[in-house]
Amino acid sequence: METLWQRPPTIWYDWPVADQESYETTRLRLRAYRESDAPRVLDIHSRNDVRRWIDDPPVTPMRDLAEAREWVHVWDALHAADPRLGAWAIVAKDTGVVAGTVLLASVPNSDALVQIGWHLHPDSTGRGYVTEAAPVLLARAFEHPMPEVYALMFIDNAPSAAVCERLGMRDLGIVEKWYEGESRCFRTTYEEWRTR
C-alpha cells in the first residue's frame, strides 16, 4: 500500500476549504482539517501503531508539525481539485478532540475507483467512532454519484475488516490488484447501500 499523500508547496492557513461539507452524527462532527489541528495530526501520524495500517513497510512516522501541516494542506488541495474526495476530521462532540480521520480517496492504479478509509488515535479506538462516521461518507459518495466504493486494507487489519462487515460492505477477499502485495478488499455498490 502506498502513502495517500505527497508533499505540497508550503502554504499554511487555518481554515478549511470553503466548499468541504461538514456533517454531524449523534456523537461526532466530521469537518475539514485546519492548520490548528496539526499537533493532533502529528500525535496520530507519529505513532507506528497507526502508521503501520497506512504505509507500506518500512513504516515512516510523521516527524514534525511542518509535516503535519503539509498533510492538512494536501487533503484540502485534493478536495479542492476533486470535490468527491477528501479527508474529514472525526471530532468527538463531548470533548472537541480530533479522534482521527475518515476519508474518500482514489484507488491507486485504477480507472477512477474510490475507496473509503479511516484511522484513529489509539485513545479513540473501541468507541464505535468509525462505524458511526463511515456511513456518512458512504452516503455522500453515492450522492455524487459514485457507482461503488471500495475499502482496501492490509490483510491482517482485523479491526477495519470488522468495521466493513458492520457497514454491510461485501468481502471480496484477498486481491493483488491496485497496491503492491496483497490487500483485503471490501466493496459496496449504490444499490447494495440503498437496500441494506
Image (cartoon, grey):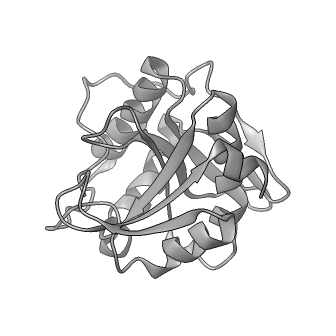
Residue at the image position 48 percent from the left and 55 percent from the top: 40
| Residue 124 percent location from the top left of the image | 60, 71
Q: Nearer the viewer, residue 51 or 134?
A: 134
Res 91 seen here: no
Q: Residue furthest left?
A: 58
Q: Nearer the viewer, residue 92 or 104?
A: 104
| Residue 8 percent location from the top left of the image | 26, 28
Residue at the image position 36 percent from the left and 32 percent from the top: 74
Total numbered circles: 0
| Residue 151 percent location from the top left of the image | 47, 57
Q: Nearer the viewer, residue 33 or 55?
A: 55
| Residue 154 percent location from the top left of the image | 33, 70
Residue 45 occupies quadrant: bottom left
Image quarter where the C terminus lies is: bottom right
**19 to the left or right of 44:** right
**78 to the left or right of 98:** left
Q: Nearer the viewer, residue 137 or 128?
A: 137
Residue 52 occupies quadrant: bottom left
Residue at the image position 39 percent from the left and 31 percent from the top: 73
Residue at the image position 25 percent from the left and 62 percent from the top: 61
Res 175 seen here: yes
Image quarter where the N terminus lies is: bottom left
Q: Is residue 74 above or below residue 172?
A: above
**95 to the left or right of 145:** right
